[in-house]
Image (cartoon, rainbow, N blue to C red):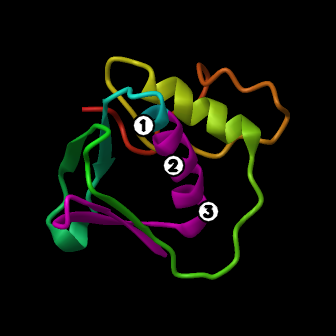
Amino acid sequence: MGKFVYEGGVKTEIEDRALTHLQLVITAKLRRGEPFPFSWREDASVGGGRTTVWIQPSSSLVFKYFGSRQPSINRAWIEALAFTANAPSGLYLVPEPSDTGEASGSGDAPVSAPV
């Protein structure tokens, strides 16, 4: 289980494979200078609820992985996550689709609903 840390304080645990895919989408948006919100649901063990952070090129982000191996990349998942990141509600984790290369992001139910 990896960790996403925002500005040295706000953090959440995300499975390594999902975190890798989120990192690819987040860094692609930041390379283009595109700020966006990123939302997730908090685990009941930390009080539940949801958190949204505003990610911009000057944000301090840490992607901390539990494992040392880079997982294989699912292009369909990248496209589905990028679809949410480009929507007004911002980036949120969606279930991993099969890697068919034809994901539009429109039929995926969110794991964490947008704020």
Q: CA distance from mark 2 to mark 1?
A: 12 Å
The spot of residue 59 in percent (x, y) is 25, 48
- For the C terminus, the image quarter is top left
Q: Nearer the viewer, residue 9 or 114?
A: 9
Nearer the viewer's eye, disc 3 or disc 1? Answer: 1
| Residue 50 visible in image | yes
Q: Amino acid at mark 1?
A: Leu
Binning the other alpha carbons within 10 Å of mark 2 as few (below 14), some (14 to 19) or many (20 upward) gives many
> Which label was assigned to residue 22?
2
Residue at left 35%, top 36%?
A: 113
Over which residues does the magenta segment extend?
Answer: 1-28
Q: Amino acid at mark 2?
A: Leu
**Circles 3, 2 touching at the beta carbon (< 8 Å):** no
Q: CA distance from mark 3 to mark 1?
A: 20 Å
Q: CA distance from mark 3 to mark 2?
A: 9 Å
Instruction: From this view, report whether residue 112 is shown above or below residue 82.
Output: below
Q: Which residue is mark 3?
A: 17
The spot of residue 22 in percent (x, y) is 51, 49
Q: Which of the marked residues, 2 or 1, is nearer the chain's N terminus?
A: 2
Q: Element under label 1? A: helix
Quick check: 10 left or right of 41? left
Q: Nearer the viewer, residue 32 or 26?
A: 32
Asked if residue 2 is among those painted magenta in the image, a careful observer would answer yes
Residue at left 74%, top 52%?
A: 73
Quarter assignment of residue 114: top left
Q: Which residue is mark 1?
A: 30
Q: Which of the marked residues, 3 or 2, is nearer the chain's N terminus?
A: 3
Q: Amino acid at mark 3?
A: Arg
Instruction: From this view, report whether residue 106 is shown above or below residue 21.
Output: above
